[in-house]
Each structure stands twice: as structure tokens, then as C-alpha cells.
Amino acid sequence: MEPRLRNVLIRMFISVAVFIYIGYLAWQRLSPFDFWVIMAFFGVYLTWSIIETIIYKSPDTLAKEDDDRKSYIYLQFSSMAALFYALVDFIEYHFTRNPAFEPAVTVIGFVVFLVSCVIRYQAIITLGKYYNPRVSVYEEHSLITRGIYRNIRHPIYVSAILNVAAIAMIFNSWGALILAAAAVVPAVIYRINVEEEFLLKHFDNDYKCYMEQSKKLIPKIW
């Protein structure tokens, strides 16, 4: 079995186990509203994990160079920290949860989460065999500037920011939103800087031209 697919399946298995355990605890301890918010979130999360596994395409060639500089770990850790805080805030301590905003903020959060999934889906489909969570290039690698990449260079990181903002809204945790702004956004910016330096090294003038014709995250703005 291809290593990445094996890792995804392992992660999904763990997610299902956690989902069942948290679901059991939620059923015993939480109000009906809180219970169904938790169940809906994990249902959407698992559905997206399955979709991403299905649309993933294995590369035709090996990666010839990798220069991640721990940016992937930094991004994953900060995102998981925001998720953990949001869950704890929602279920147990209510440090920054304001029930007055519910259920409207929760519904908006689910909408934003789905938008982030659509953006990520389009980005992964467009990258095809070149999609890799790490900063790397493959043998015979081509620069992708079409589709969703035409106007913005990093749609996957747009999705990452929207995703963590959505989680903060779903669980009505303004503390998680602050944590996202303080940790996830800097992690994204660091990752972008690492990636663009790496791509300039490998694609030189082609990437410089692409940078002149596109924006990092927000079309026509930045």
C-alpha cells in the first residue's frame, strides 16, 4: 500500500475511534444542541477525509528535493491547538463561549467550513499528481498556474485559514479564533515564505512572472 494512503487510513481509523468515544461522552453529558453540533462536525470532517483520500493522485515520479523547514509541523500543530481549545471551550469550560450567539454562529461556521473544503478540493484537483503536503518538487515537475491557481498562488492555505476560523465559529469559541490569529496565520505566512523561496529557486523567471500576475491569498489584494 502506498505510504501516504496508509497514513491517511490510519488517521481516519483513529478519527473514527475518537468520534465514537467523544460521541458516547457527549451523549452522556451534553445538552441535545451540543451533542448534535459535535456529531455534525465529526460527520463533516470524516466525510471530507474520505473525499480527500479518493481524489488524491500518486505522483508519477519521485520527489527530487524537499525543503519543508518544519513548516508543515508548525502549521499542523497550531491548527490542532486551535481545534483542541475550541472543543474544550465548547464542551467543558466555556471560557470564551457566548450562548447568545448560538445557533447562528454555529450555522455560519458550518457554511465557512464547507467553503474551505470546496476551495481545498479545487486546489487538490488542479495540482493533481503534484499535490504534496510538504514543500517539494518532483522530477519533470511543471508549474501550475491554471484554474484556482490563476489568481491566487496558495488556495490551500486560504482553505486552512478558513477551516480554523470555521471551527472557532462552529464551537462558538472566540478564544480559538484569537489563537488562530496568533498562531495559525503566522504559521501560514511562514509556510508561504518557505514555499515561495523554494519555488523561485526551481522555477526562477517562470515563478517571478507568475508572482507578478497573481496574489498570495486574496485576489487583487494580497
Image (spheres, helix red, strand yellow):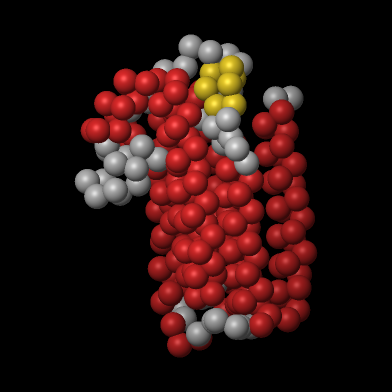
Out of 169 and 107, give the one closest to the viewer.
169
Which residue is painted at 58% across and 43% down in the image? 71
Q: Is residue 102 above or below residue 122?
A: below
Residue at 59% x, 57% y is 78
Q: Is residue 23 left or right of residue 162?
A: right
On the image, the x and y values in percent for residue 56 come to: 55, 31
The residue lying at 54 percent from left, 18 percent from top is 138
Observer-nearest of 73 and 95: 73
Q: Residue furthest bottom?
A: 100
The answer to whether residue 221 is seen in the rendering is yes
Which part of the image, by quadrant, shows the N terminus? top right
Residue 163 seen by the camera: no
| Image coords of residue 206 (percent x, y) | 32, 21
As drawn, 184 above or below 214: below
The answer to which quarter of the image holds residue 22 is bottom right
Q: Residue furthest top?
A: 140
Q: Position of residue 136 (x, y in %)?
A: 55, 27
Which corner quadrant of the image does residue 114 belong to?
A: bottom left
